[in-house]
Image (cartoon, helix red, strand yellow):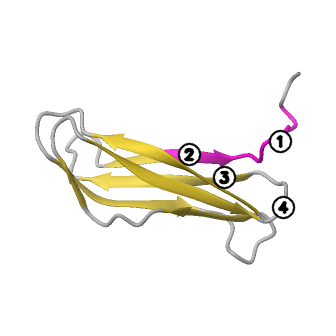
Amino acid sequence: PLDASTDIVIGNTGDATLQVFSIAITENPVTDNSPQGVLYIEEVGQLELPAGAERAITIGAGLKDFEALEGTVRISSADGQQSDIYIPVHIRPEGWVDDTATE
């Protein structure tokens, strides 16, 4: 298996404390029993981010084979302008070349 992780950073660019309700993988087309692997994210529960604050969250992948893996991270918050943010996640093993790659 190939395991890797990295941090994503969420931040509050507003001028008031931001309440984050949840951060989760919402589209993970595979499970632990799949041939590709699984995405996982650090469990953080609810957060309060003061104005200007940032928080790193660890996201990882457990790949069972030399295959690409995709999913989506959803951040739900009390932000009045954008309460849900969706972040596409594309995991590629080092050395991966897909059909659209050019040299």
Q: Would you name the residue on which mark 3 appears?
A: 70
Single out the mark in the foreground, 2 or 1: 1
Percent x, y for residue 29?
Answer: 66, 64
Between marks 4 and 2, how big is the CA–CA gap? Answer: 21 Å
Percent x, y for residue 30?
Answer: 69, 67
Numbered-mark total: 4
Between marks 1 and 4, how big is the CA–CA gap? Answer: 12 Å
- Taking the view exactly as shown, the residue that stands out farthest to the bottom is 33
Identity of the amino acid at label 4?
Asp
Looking at the image, is mark 1 or mark 3 earlier in the sequence? 3
Hey, which quadrant is residue 60 in on the image?
bottom right
Q: Would you name the residue on which mark 4 appears?
A: 65
Q: Which residues are magenta?
A: 87-100
Hey, which quadrant is residue 17 in on the image?
top left
Identity of the amino acid at label 2?
Pro
Percent x, y for residue 68?
Answer: 77, 51
Identity of the amino acid at label 1?
Trp
